[in-house]
């Protein structure tokens, strides 16, 4: 087996590392120092740089000005972005655009994708449902009226909603199907309320009241929402990994120079053991992330203990779990792991970790947001249990 990244994927890492290297975490607005949202909009200047570096079109086909790469490349870039707390909707906009590319109507793709790749159109996704503790597609109903769909319902905590041009909204029909509607910001029949995340970023509560969306702006293809949700969740795991790696590096640097009793505290066994445990967490987060990203990128069925392919991409009884199983495992590790990493960092930094002159408190706030985004570990453990019950690995 070859676990190395391709030349194209490595090039994406190098380009993103160079670009994000110019972002100072100390300059990221602090939720501890700001009442309400830390800013009205995302970092537009950084967004323009991402567009100029062709990092917004990584997953788009060359026909739309993209590089035609996969979810692994996106996760590599997201990992770098989280190390500096980049305030941009890179995950949401890219995931929404690639879903349109795979499942949308030709007219919609032609009018949207190239512009999204150039950063001219920003997309986001309503992925949290009415309360954040229910399937997002159940929070909105969709009724067909000729060539138009009418949407009613509420989606909470929509990331970057106040700055995005289009929100991809999952909704369910009377016959149990799930569709995705591309809802423009300020569209008639929509109201966008104010919410704030634990990281201090501005979120939106999207209320749809008989909002009429043309059929061409609605994706009805089976599996589109599941694909989008899996990509969003896996991308969130990549963000958690990048943040955790930077925090552990910060902790290593601090404990290596902080002295007690004449010795660096990093040389004390209790400190070294805690740091080692967090390193193990990060390596588990990394392994499960790449497994999930690989399944999404290839549609692979996975392998059995003998190394032979098992099941299908959708999963079959007696074979590999569906892709959602690997995504759930990755999110369990990401949620638990990033929480433990920042908690240990706070402990080993002592009072300095809570000092608002240090960037560590910013990382802690972002980590809590990532831990809970698209469901905490317990929610994904329940989902994984359901998958194991219905897809015996036999």
Image (cartoon, rainbow, N blue to C red):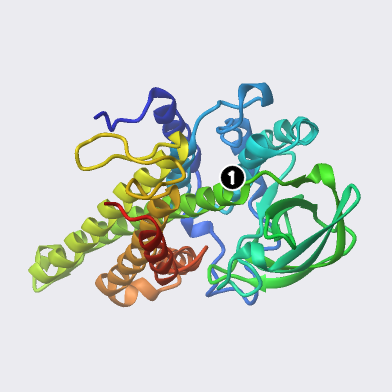
Front residue of 240/318: it is 318
Residue 387, how many percent across, how many down? 40, 59
Rendered image quadrant of residue 30: bottom right
Look at the numbered disc 1 and give the secondary structure of its residue.
helix
Q: Is residue 66 left or right of residue 106?
A: left
Q: Residue at x 29, y 39 (%)?
A: 303
Residue 362, how many percent across, how many down? 46, 66
Q: Residue at x 68, y 68 (%)?
A: 139
Asked whether residue 352 appears in the rendered view, the answer is: yes
Q: Quadrant of the N terminus?
A: top left
Rendered image quadrant of residue 63: top right
Q: Is residue 325 left or right of residue 124?
A: left
Q: Is residue 161 above or below residue 119?
A: below
Q: Residue at x 12, y 71 (%)?
A: 270
Q: Is residue 58 above or below residue 236?
A: above
Front residue of 112/115: it is 112
Q: Residue at x 33, y 46 (%)?
A: 319
Q: Number of labelled discs?
A: 1
Residue wearing tag 1: 95
Q: Is residue 226 left or right of residue 221?
A: left
Asked whether residue 24 appears in the rendered view, the answer is: no
Residue 55, how many percent across, how many down? 56, 35
Q: Is residue 357 above or below residue 108?
A: below
Packing grade of label 1 (10 A; few <14, some 14-19, many >=20) is many
Front residue of 383/26: it is 383
Residue 127, how many percent across, how many down? 61, 60
């Amino acid at each position: 087996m070859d676990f190395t990244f391709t030349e194209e994927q490595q090039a994406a890492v190098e380009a993103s590392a160079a670009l994000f290297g110019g972002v100072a975490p100390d300059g990221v607005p602090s939720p501890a120092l700001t009442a309400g949202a830390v800013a009205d909009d995302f970092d537009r200047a950084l967004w323009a740089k991402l567009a100029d570096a062709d990092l917004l079109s990584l997953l788009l086909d060359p026909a739309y000005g993209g590089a035609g790469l996969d979810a692994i490349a996106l996760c590599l870039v997201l990992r770098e972005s989280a190390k500096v707390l980049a305030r941009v909707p890179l995950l949401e906009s890219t995931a929404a655009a690639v879903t349109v590319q795979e499942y949308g109507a030709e007219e919609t793709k032609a009018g949207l994708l190239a512009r999204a790749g150039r950063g001219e159109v920003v997309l986001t996704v309503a992925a949290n449902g009415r309360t954040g503790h229910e399937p997002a597609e159940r929070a909105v109903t969709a009724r067909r009226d000729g060539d138009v769909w009418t949407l009613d319902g509420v989606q909470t905590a929509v990331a970057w909603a106040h700055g995005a041009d289009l929100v991809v909204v999952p909704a369910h029909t009377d016959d149990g199907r799930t569709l995705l509607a591309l809802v423009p910001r300020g569209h008639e029949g929509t109201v966008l309320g104010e919410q704030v995340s634990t990281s201090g970023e501005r979120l939106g509560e999207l209320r749809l009241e008989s909002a009429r969306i043309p059929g061409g702006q609605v994706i009805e293809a089976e599996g589109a929402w599941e694909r989008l949700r899996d990509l969003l969740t896996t991308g969130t795991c990549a963000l958690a990994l990048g943040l955790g790696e930077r925090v552990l590096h910060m902790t290593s640097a601090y404990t290596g120079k902080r002295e007690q009793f004449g010795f660096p505290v990093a040389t004390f066994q209790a400190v070294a053991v805690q740091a080692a445990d967090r390193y193990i967490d990060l390596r588990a987060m990394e392994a499960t992330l790449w497994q999930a990203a690989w399944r999404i990128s290839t549609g692979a069925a996975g392998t059995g203990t003998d190394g032979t392919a098992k099941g299908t991409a959708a999963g079959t009884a007696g074979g590999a779990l569906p892709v959602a199983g690997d995504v759930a495992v990755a999110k369990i590790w990401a949620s638990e792991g990033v929480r433990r990493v920042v908690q240990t960092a706070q402990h080993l930094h002592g009072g300095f970790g809570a000092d608002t002159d240090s960037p560590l408190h910013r990382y802690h706030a972002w980590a809590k947001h990532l831990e809970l985004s698209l469901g905490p570990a317990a929610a994904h453990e329940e989902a994984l249990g359901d998958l194991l019950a219905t897809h015996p690995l036999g």
